Each structure stands twice: as C-alpha cells, then as structure tokens.
Image (cartoon, grey):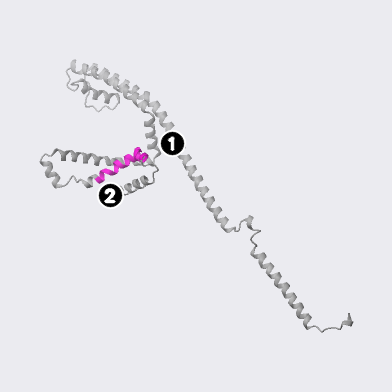
Amino acid sequence: MFIVETVCVAWFSLEWILRFIQARSKLDFIRGPLNVIDAMAILPYYVSLAVDEDDPTLDHEKAGGTSYLDKLGLVLRILRALRILYVMRLARHSLGLQTLGLTVRKSTREFGLLLLFLCVAVTLFSPLVHLAESELTGAQDFSSIPASYWWAIISMTTVGYGDMVPRSIPGQVVALSSILSGILIMAFPATSIFHMFSKSYQELKQEHNRLFKEECAAAAALAATSREGQEGSEDFPPPGLRHMCPDTESTRSLESLSLLENGGVVSGNNQHSHSPRLPAGAF
C-alpha cells in the first residue's frame, strides 16, 4: 500500500505542478477550491514522511509527557485522515459530482431555511419530551433538555437509533408529533433543492456539449488548415504567378522547336552546298 500510495502521490504532485505552471493567473489557481482540495490531499503524505509517528524516539519522548509531541501526533493523524480527499478529485471528471457541488452552492438559502426550521422544531420538542418523561414518569434517558436535543434531531430526521425511547403515553404523543413535523419540514425545501439540482444538471450538460462542439470545430479547422497548406505546397507557383514562371513542358516544346528550325537550316545549307551550281543563263 505504501508503494501504491507513493506512485499515486507522485503522479498527483506532477499533475498539480504542471497545472500550476500552465495557469495564467497563479493567484486564481491557488484560490480555486478544487486545487486547494488537491493540495490538502497531497500534503499529508509529505508531512508523514517528514515526521514519522512510529519513530521509537518519538514514542519515548511521548512517554515523558511532552504535550507538544502529543499535539503533533494528533495533527499527523488528522492529516492522514485527510487522504480521503482523493475521492474529491473525481469531481473534475464526473458530471454528477459537479452537479451536486453546483446545487449546494446555489441552494444555500434553501439549506439555511431547512436548518432554521429544524432548529426551531428541536427547540420546541426537546423540552416537551423532557417534561413528559422525566417530570411525569421519572425516566433517566431524558436527563436534561440539552440531552433531549439528540433525540429530537434523530426523530425529526426519521433516523431513530433507538438509544433514547419515550416510554410514557405523553412522551409517545410528543414523539409522534415531532416525527410528523420533521417529515413536513424536510419535504418543504427538498422540492426546491430538487428543481435546482435538475436545473444545474441541464446547465452543466449544455456547457459540456458546447465545449465539446468547440473542441471538435477547432480540431476540424486545424485539420483543414493543414490540408490547405499541403495542397498549396504541391500547387506551386501560385496561379497569379504562373504567367511569370514558364511551365517546364512549354519550355521543352520551345526548345524542341528551336532545335528543329536549326536542324532545318543546317540541312538546307548542306543541301545547297552539295547540289551542282547552274549557270546564270539558265534563269
């Protein structure tokens, strides 16, 4: 596992450094949430290499009661736990995770309303169940109102661990009321969040399709440009300059005609030179 982790961290580190070098704005790159998550996922490995928690000298100093080393070991264990952030790197390639993050960012008001409704209901039902169980029946499960908050939260979210259960009839009536109100409270903002999720998914899908089409168009334009460049190199000289540059075939034909004319003249001279001379009176 150490070898596998070393190879993965080396690859992630190289990728992060190359993206940092190619970034136009280094400050915007460092401020990016996904880039921060990548750095937080990589750094614990190097910190664990620099400070080995299993070092026997470190254990000996811990036995001496050094609080600084205890805190350092706790920080190291927390950093090692942050390696789970490797999973967040999938958000770069997963449309579903990107949609989830965009939905959470756009639905902050709805989540705030949900938290507000839940807090109000918990504050309302916790004293009621404490009064019904502790004051009327003397049960020890609901020892205080703050301790009853846990029961109200798990009841309203319909989780119900069963560690705290009302035994009396008034307590069960309060529990039924809290469960029904919890269902309604959870359902009200959920509809808006669902619509926001669907809208965000459609926006990201259209954005991905647009980027894909732009990449295809750029690749096609590059291929067409290279093809035109190859055709232009084969078709030389250009049509506008062909009248200035004689063709090779026409040049050869002209040379052959000139040779024929010269040959005819030479042959005619030879014929005149070998033919007998006539007297002038014959004409």
Q: Residue at x 26, y 43 (%)?
A: 44
Q: For residue 201, what is the image quadrant? A: top left
Q: For the residue marked with disc 2, what is the amino acid?
A: Thr
Q: Secondary structure at mark 1?
A: helix
Q: How many marks?
A: 2
Image position of 59 (left or right of 95) = left
Q: Is residue 101 above or below residue 166?
A: below
Image position of 263 (left or right of 238) = right
Where does the C terminus fall, quadrant-wise?
bottom right
Is residue 117 inside the magenta stretch? no
Q: Mark 2 packing: few (<14 Cα in 10 Å), some, or many (20+)?
A: few
Q: For the residue marked with disc 1, what is the amino acid?
A: Leu
Q: For residue 230, what is the image quadrant? A: bottom right
Q: Is residue 94 above or below residue 106?
A: below
Q: Which residues are magenta?
A: 27-46
Q: Which mark is residue 204?
A: 1
Q: Which residue is mark 2?
A: 6
- Which residue is more in the foreground, 226 or 162? 226
